[in-house]
């Protein structure tokens, strides 16, 4: 087996980005598992894995990863928005709305404002 180095982890991360773009979220998760095992503090890898879990309809793992990201970066508007989408998809609309509103407050992008049910003027 190939020895894992920081360089191979970067390669795996970039390959996971490509797999996600190619709509292969399960393949992306497989690559990211080793990256996160070696670098559990890497928020970017966790955010990418959360997105992959979401796209693979693995909502509970996605929720947990988004929560880890938000523990480390509570001002990450995208993570709040994505967690909101995850909760919404899981049928937990009230919890989702809280995260949509936090995302919109942190970064008033139209998608975030609409999801938060704020008026766009």
Image (cartoon, grey):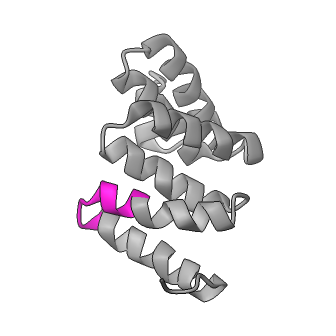
Q: In which quarter of the image is the C terminus?
A: top left
User: Could you tell whether 13 is left or right of 42 in the image?
Assistant: left
Q: In this view, does 22 lie above or below 82?
A: below
Q: Does the magenta stretch include residue 24?
A: yes
Question: Does the magenta stretch mainly form a helix, a strand or a loop?
Answer: helix
Q: Please, is residue 87 above or below residue 109 in the view?
A: above
The image shows residue 64 at horizontal and vertical percentages of 57, 35
| Quarter holding residue 85 | top left
- The region drawn magenta spans 21-29
| Residue under the image location 40 percent in, 45 percent down | 53
Give the percent coordinates (x, y) of residue 82. Answer: 47, 40
Q: Is residue 2 visible?
A: yes
Question: Taking the image as drawn, is residue 121 in sight?
Answer: no
Residue 32 position within the rendered picture, expressed as x and y whole percent measured from the top left: 49, 63
Residue at 51% of width from left, 34% of height from top? 63
With 84 as the anchor, is 89 left or right in this view? left
Q: Which of 38 and 67 is in front in this view?
A: 38
């Amino acid at each position: 087996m190939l020895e894992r180095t920081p360089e191979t982890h970067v390669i795996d991360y970039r390959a996971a980005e490509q797999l996600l773009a190619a709509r292969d979220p399960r393949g992306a998760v497989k690559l990211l598992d080793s990256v996160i095992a070696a670098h559990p503090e890497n928020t970017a890898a966790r955010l990418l894995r959360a997105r992959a879990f979401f796209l693979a309809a693995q909502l509970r793992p996605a929720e947990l990863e988004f929560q880890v990201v938000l523990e480390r970066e509570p001002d990450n508007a995208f993570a709040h928005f994505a967690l909101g989408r995850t909760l919404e998809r899981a049928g937990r609309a009230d919890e989702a709305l809280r995260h949509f509103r936090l995302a919109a407050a942190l970064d008033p992008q139209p998608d975030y404002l609409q999801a938060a049910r704020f008026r766009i003027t």
